[in-house]
Amino acid sequence: MNSILPINTNPTETEPSETGQRTIFLIEDEVPILDLSTVMLMRAGFRVLKAANATEAALVWQKEGTSVDLLISDISIPGRSGPEMAREFRTSRPGLKIIFASGNTRDSVSDSAQFFKGAKFLLKPFSMKSLLDLARAELGINSS
């Protein structure tokens, strides 16, 4: 079964100067969501690092972790949970902003994410507008 997802190609949605070339680290095991989210975040002017599992995420973080402004991670990732990885990443980057995403309701994931003061939650399926709006808000960027 093939899925066709619409992509808004409006170049005026966000200019790269508004994002200040901020870096977002996206961890998502569903490759179509990872790829589409990456494209949309890049079109909005963000630099995007991505990983589809815990092993890839650890390698990316080791190489580029100091440049990450925002972590967007699925709660459930093969090899390790998103909150476990986020806890580890925050040891080397205490001010790291975090958005957790999950197909489960907020109540069912709150226990695993409760120790993250200020972390936000994005319920799947989410719209690209919701993703961009929340990322911008977390990074202190005004939406147009």
Image: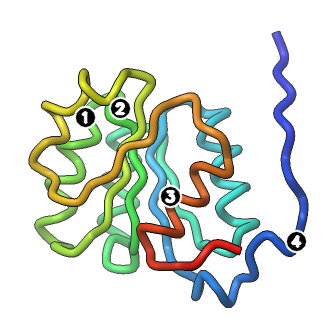
Q: State how far apart marks 2 and 1 are (Cα).
A: 5 Å
Q: Is residue 11 left or right of residue 49?
A: right
Q: State how far apart marks 2 and 3 are (Cα).
A: 21 Å
Q: Is residue 39 left or right of residue 116?
A: right
Q: State how far apart marks 4 and 3 are (Cα).
A: 19 Å
Q: Is residue 144 left or right of residue 90?
A: right
Q: How many other residues sit within 10 Å of disc 4, few (<14), some (14-19) or many (≥20)?
A: few
The residue beneath circle 3 is: 134
Nearest to the eye among marks 4 and 1: give it: 4
Where residue 115 appears, as percent x and y from the top left, is 9, 48
- Say what secondary structure mark 4 lies in: loop
Nearest to the eye among marks 4 and 3: give it: 3
Discs 4, 3 touching: Cβ within 8 Å: no
Q: Which is nearer the eye, 129 or 101?
A: 129
Nearest to N terminus: mark 2 or mark 3:
2
The residue beneath circle 2 is: 77
Specify the amino acid type for callout 1.
Ser
